[in-house]
Amino acid sequence: MSAPRAPSLVRRAAAAAAVLAALLVVPAVAGTYQTQLLTYGLTLAIAALGFNLLLGYTGLLSFGHSAFFGAGAYAVAFMMRYLGVSSMELFILGGVAFSAVLAALLGVVCVRHTRIFFAILTLALSQVLWTLAYKFFWITGGTDGLRVPFSKVTLLGGLVGFPGADAFAKFITSYYYYVLVAFCVCVALMWLIVHSPFGKTLQAIRDNETRARFLGVRIWRYRWLAFLVSGIFTGVAGSLWVPLNGLTTPDVLYWPQSGKIVFFAVLGGFRNFTGPMVGAVIFNYLEVYAVAVTEYWQITLGVILIALVTFLPSGIVGTAARLSARLKRKRGAST
Amino acid sequence: MSLLRTERLTKHFGETRAVDGVDFTVNEGEFLSLVGTNGAGKTTLVNLISAFLSPDSGRIFIADRDITYAPVDERIRAGIARSFQLVNLFDDLSVLDNVALAIFAREGKTKRIFSLAERDTAVTQEATELLGQFGLAGKAEGLAGGLAQGERKLLDVAVAYALRPKLLFLDEPTSGVSTREKAQIMDTVSSVVRGGGITAVVIEHDMDVVFKYSDRVVVMHEGRFLADGPPEEIRQNRDVATYLLGTDV
């Protein structure tokens, strides 16, 4: 077996630039609704990016990432409701702080375990948060949730606001670019992290914990740090998502939200950097259109999941990369 | 001068006395072979010294520092490294990354989160040179999981060696490879380790390999030391001939 050669940095940068160029023109060529859908997709892609630091790079399957997504969303809602904050930048900082504290605490409990024990612990702890969001309804709004109306949100330190009759369309366009910048920053940061000595160490732990331990790596500490970073990214996603949704309810803390994030990674492929992001964007479209077509949309998604696990275990991006490599080998052999 | 010393080191698994009150000394600069039949206690002894297992009783000292209950990372900092009987590599990482990671760990750089690993030219250069010493320079970019068995054995040793330990334990570095490969692996390992001035303890079954490369041979039988001395003396030892070689002297 020979190693597949990684695409060069130049080719990667060119591909990223092409994708970015396409994303930049979306509001100009697509309507408000499509732009809104893609904005949702980009926020979910940030969550997938964070989640995959644990699954793809550290080998830990979390079924509790709704906790961090919800932490980010509720941080924004609390800040708006109780502190009168309207600045999106402060919301993001609040989301980072809230999800970081939560991830730091949950991480202490969870990272001492792996495999099914880790998955169950993360699931259980996120369900505790969901219950708390229900029970403390005088703070969280219970099932009614907390509203985060876009008209009260300002961007760029208050420079951009959204009053007026056509505010929604203006908000969607402005917010799309805002989320796109946040997405690019998150992608760049995560790319740096997974290619750093720290990221390589996580991959080493994933591949062979024993050997990593016998290099002097303190496994728990690194898993905890990965958990923390992963939680923060997912928290940022939750913070960016809530003004778009206009409301946060305990549903964002419930286990199906964690299941969706796992689905993103499986759909796109979690053994490559871009897979979970692609999975998140595609899942968002699948969900929206499946809901529109049939009331049994969950069955549709279930069938897709079964088909993926059975026929495309490396996900859409993983499979595409494999096919592309095979095609190149064939071309190489024929010339 | 002794680098490693154990005092009455003991490990039982139920009724089995895997290591039974062993006093073991390794002197600085030695290339020592630890031999014995299957179940003699060789790997258990190395596992106890490297913190893979905890002893039931006894003490372990490295350079007169008691490390009996020190965790793995502390023992590594104290200068102990090891390879494994069943090759333990990071199969989905490149060959270069396997060695580079050991260097990052040694240099305390594994916590660096916002710098590109491949941009650390000092580490990359050292890893490349080290792979060259082990004859793996041509494989640097490939995945470790794609190497042949003999190459995997060499990389396993190279990763441990990259920690620049004072004392390197090699657990059967030639198991599962052809006779020709055995000689190649041992020539390479012996030359690199001796060249680096590192003390090495090799667990080995092949007595031709043991007699050819070792300065000193320690023979274990049923958890205890049966003989200890230079290769020629061990070759002439009647007990060793009976229990290990199955021949008469």
Image (cartoon, coloured by chain):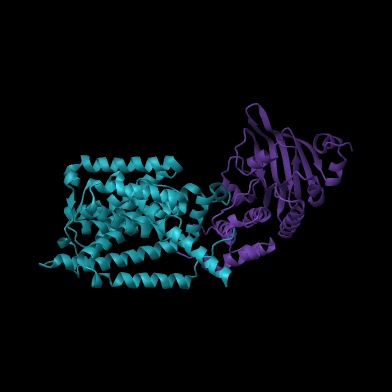
- Which color was chain B given? purple
Q: Nearer the viewer, residue B115 or A27?
A: A27
- Taking the view exactly as shown, the residue that stands out farthest to the left is A165
A274 vs B183, left or right, is left
**Picture residue at 51% right of the left edge, 49% below the top:** A218
Q: Quadrant for the C terminus of chain A, please.
A: bottom right
Is residue A322 in view from this perspective? Answer: yes
Q: Quadrant of residue B152?
A: bottom right
Residue B173, percent across and down?
70, 50
* For residue B78, side relative to residue B113 (left or right): right
User: Of A132 and B24, which appears nearest the observer?
Assistant: A132
Q: Is residue A67 visible?
A: no
- From the top left corner, tell me how far across and down residue A10 is, in percent: 47, 73
Picture colour for chain A: cyan
Q: Quadrant of residue A134?
A: top left
Q: Quadrant of the N terminus of chain A?
A: bottom right
Q: Tell me which residue sits at (39%, 65%) in the image.
A: A188
Q: Quadrant of residue A239?
A: bottom left
Measured as percent of width and height from the top left, residue A316 is found at 41, 58
Viewer-nearest residue: B133 or B184: B184
Name the residue at 28% across, 50% down: A70
In this view, the residue farthest toward the right is B249
On the image, the x and y values in percent for residue B126 come to 62, 65
**Residue ranking furthest to the front:** A334
Q: How many numbered callouts? A: 0
